[in-house]
Amino acid sequence: MAAGDPEGSPRDPLTTDPKGEACRAPGHSEIQTTRNTPALIARQGAYGRAVPLDPWFVTGLMDGEGCFCISLAIRAKPRRRLEVRPSFALSLNEKDLQLREDLQAFFACGWIRESKNDRTFKYEVRSIGDLTEKILPHFERFPLQGRKARSCAGFSHVCRMVEQGRHLQRNGLRETVDIAYEMNLGRRRHSRATT
């Protein structure tokens, strides 16, 4: 350290450049990957490298801000009276646009939409193929803890049933309804008896 640059001062190289990046010769940019990361984010980090989302960060974000939902819609046609719609959503403030886009790139599926009810933006996935091939495998490798882990297990079971068409059979539909009402404790348009 040069004389006159005390530790912690603005001119101290260890304080202002703790990783020694300033003295490193510019070279080819490296892409740092996290094991089992489905996709890399194109956004550049502070040191010029592509920044992947950490899979455990995604799981933690889901634990705090996400929702596994099984919607049930009553249809007019008598042949298939109840429609089952699984969806995965993560709500974030409008200031977190970059993070929503990073999530979309991480999973390589879904879309972002505005929710005017709570003035948030949601990253959402509804395609059964994307749910079973991209979303659920992530949570199998990087599992949730606590109450959301139970919701994820029920959600996974329903998605597999829908994928196999078992929700169209009487017993499968009854099981789907039971899981949906156990998972989603908020207000519902229709009572359990009606469905």
Image: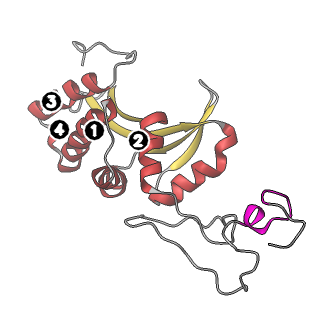
Q: Do the residues under discs 1 and 3 have CB atoms within 8 angstroms?
A: no
Distance, label 2 to label 1, CA atoms, is 9 Å
Q: Do the residues under discs 4 and 3 have CB atoms within 8 angstroms?
A: no
Q: Which residue corresponds to mark 4?
A: 168
Q: Which residues are magenta?
A: 7-17
Residue 108 x %, y %: 47, 60
| Circle 2 or circle 4, nearest the eye | 2
Question: Could you tell me which residue is drawn at 13 percent across and 35 percent down?
Answer: 172
Specify few, some or many for label 4: CA neighbours under 10 Å numbering under 14, 14-19, or 20 or more.
some
Q: Which quarter of the figure has residue 149?
A: top left
Question: Could you tell me which residue is drawn at 48 percent across and 57 percent down?
Answer: 54
| Circle 2 or circle 3, nearest the eye | 2
Q: Which mark is residue 29?
A: none
Q: Which residue corresponds to mark 2?
A: 88
Instruction: Give the left or right position of residue 66, taking residue 112 as reference.
Output: left
Name the chief secondary structure element in magenta.
Answer: loop
Q: Would residue 15 be counted in the magenta stretch? A: yes
Specify few, some or many for label 3: CA neighbours under 10 Å numbering under 14, 14-19, or 20 or more.
some
**Three-letter amino acid code at the position of disc 3:** Glu
**Three-letter amino acid code at the position of disc 4:** Leu
Secondary structure of the residue carrying tag 1 is helix
Distance, label 4 to label 1, CA atoms, is 17 Å
Instruction: Give the left or right position of residue 187, taking residue 150 as reference.
Output: right
Q: Which residue corresponds to mark 1?
A: 155
Instruction: Give the left or right position of residue 185, taking residue 176 as reference.
Output: right
Specify few, some or many for label 1: CA neighbours under 10 Å numbering under 14, 14-19, or 20 or more.
many
Specify few, some or many for label 2: CA neighbours under 10 Å numbering under 14, 14-19, or 20 or more.
many
Question: Could you tell me which residue is drawn at 17 percent across and 38 percent down?
Answer: 168
Q: Which residue corresponds to mark 3?
A: 175
Question: Could you tell me which residue is drawn at 64 percent across and 36 percent down?
Answer: 93
